[in-house]
C-alpha cells in the first residue's frame, strides 16, 4: 500500500501528460478528418472486413491512415528510453499502459471538441465505426482504458523492483 501511495503523484503527472498529448493529437485529427470520422473521406486504403479486425480492432476498418498513425505513436512513446539509453520493465509497462489510455482519451476528445460532433452526438447511431458499446461509451474505451490504467499503475508499483539497464559508455 505504501508503494501505491508513493506512486500517486508520478502517476497523476503521467496521466496529465498523456491527456495533454491526447488533446493536441485530437485537434490534429479534427483538422485532418473533419466531420468524417475514422478516415472516411481520406485518400487511404481500407480493409473493411476481416476476422482479425473483429478480434483486435473492434470490428472497425483498418485504414492506411490508422496503421501509420498507430505505429508512429507507438514509436514516439518509446522515444524517451531510446534517447536516455535506459530501459527497464517498469518503463516498458508505463509506455504500454500510456498508449491505450492516450488513444481512448484522444478518441473521446475528438468527439468532445469536434464542431461536427460534440458529446450530444457521441451515441451509436452517429458513430457507426464504433460497433460495440457498453453503456455511454464504446466497449473499447472500457477494455483498453482498464488495461492501460492497470499497466500504468503496475509500472509505478513495480518500479523499485526493476533496475534500468544502461548502455555501456
Image (tube, helix red, strand yellow):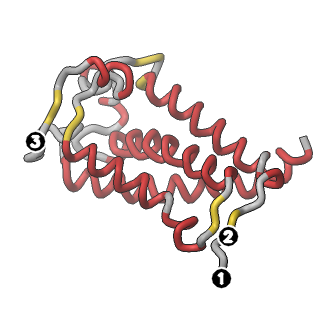
Q: Nearer the viewer, mark 3 or mark 1?
A: 1
Identify the residue position indicated by label 3 in the image: 41
Label 3 neighbour load within 10 Å: few <14, some 14-19, many 20+: few
The local secondary structure at tag 2 comes to strand
Side of 167 where 107 appears, left or right: left
Of labels 2 and 3, earlier in sequence is: 3
State yes or no: discs 3 and 1 in contact (Cβ < 8 Å): no
Which residue ends up furthest to the bottom in the rendered image?
Answer: 169
Label 2 neighbour load within 10 Å: few <14, some 14-19, many 20+: few
Q: CA distance from mark 1 to mark 2?
A: 9 Å
State yes or no: discs 1 and 2 in contact (Cβ < 8 Å): yes
Question: Where the N terminus falls, by quadrant?
Answer: top right
Of labels 3 and 1, earlier in sequence is: 3
The local secondary structure at tag 3 comes to loop
The spot of residue 153 in percent (x, y) is: 70, 43
Side of 52 where 152 appears, left or right: right
The local secondary structure at tag 1 comes to loop
Q: Nearer the viewer, residue 133 or 87?
A: 87
Q: Which mark is residue 169?
A: 1
Q: Nearer the viewer, mark 2 or mark 3?
A: 2
Q: CA distance from mark 2 to mark 3?
A: 45 Å
Name the image quarter holding residue 17. bottom right
The spot of residue 123 in percent (x, y) is: 33, 23
Side of 6 where 130 appears, left or right: left
Rendered residue at 22%/55% (across/down)? 31
Side of 129 where 4 appears, left or right: right
Identify the residue position indicated by label 2 in the image: 166
Above or below, comparing residue 81 to residue 156 in the picture: below
Amino acid at each position: 500500500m505504501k508503494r501505491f501511495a508513493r506512486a500517486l503523484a508520478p502517476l497523476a503527472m503521467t496521466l496529465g501528460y498523456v491527456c495533454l498529448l491526447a488533446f493536441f493529437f485530437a485537434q490534429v485529427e479534427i483538422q485532418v478528418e473533419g466531420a468524417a470520422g475514422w478516415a472516411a473521406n481520406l485518400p487511404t486504403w481500407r480493409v473493411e472486413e476481416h476476422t482479425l479486425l473483429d478480434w483486435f480492432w473492434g470490428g472497425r476498418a483498418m485504414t492506411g491512415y490508422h496503421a501509420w498513425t498507430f505505429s508512429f505513436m507507438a514509436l514516439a512513446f518509446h522515444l524517451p528510453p531510446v534517447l536516455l539509453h535506459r530501459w527497464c520493465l517498469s518503463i516498458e509497462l508505463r509506455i504500454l499502459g500510456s498508449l491505450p489510455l492516450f488513444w481512448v482519451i484522444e478518441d473521446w476528445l475528438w468527439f468532445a471538441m469536434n464542431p461536427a460532433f460534440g458529446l450530444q452526438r457521441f451515441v451509436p447511431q452517429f458513430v457507426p465505426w464504433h460497433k460495440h458499446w457498453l453503456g455511454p461509451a464504446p466497449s473499447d474505451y472500457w477494455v483498453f482504458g482498464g488495461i492501460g490504467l492497470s499497466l500504468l499503475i503496475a509500472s509505478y508499483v513495480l518500479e523499485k523492483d526493476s533496475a534500468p539497464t544502461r548502455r555501456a559508455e
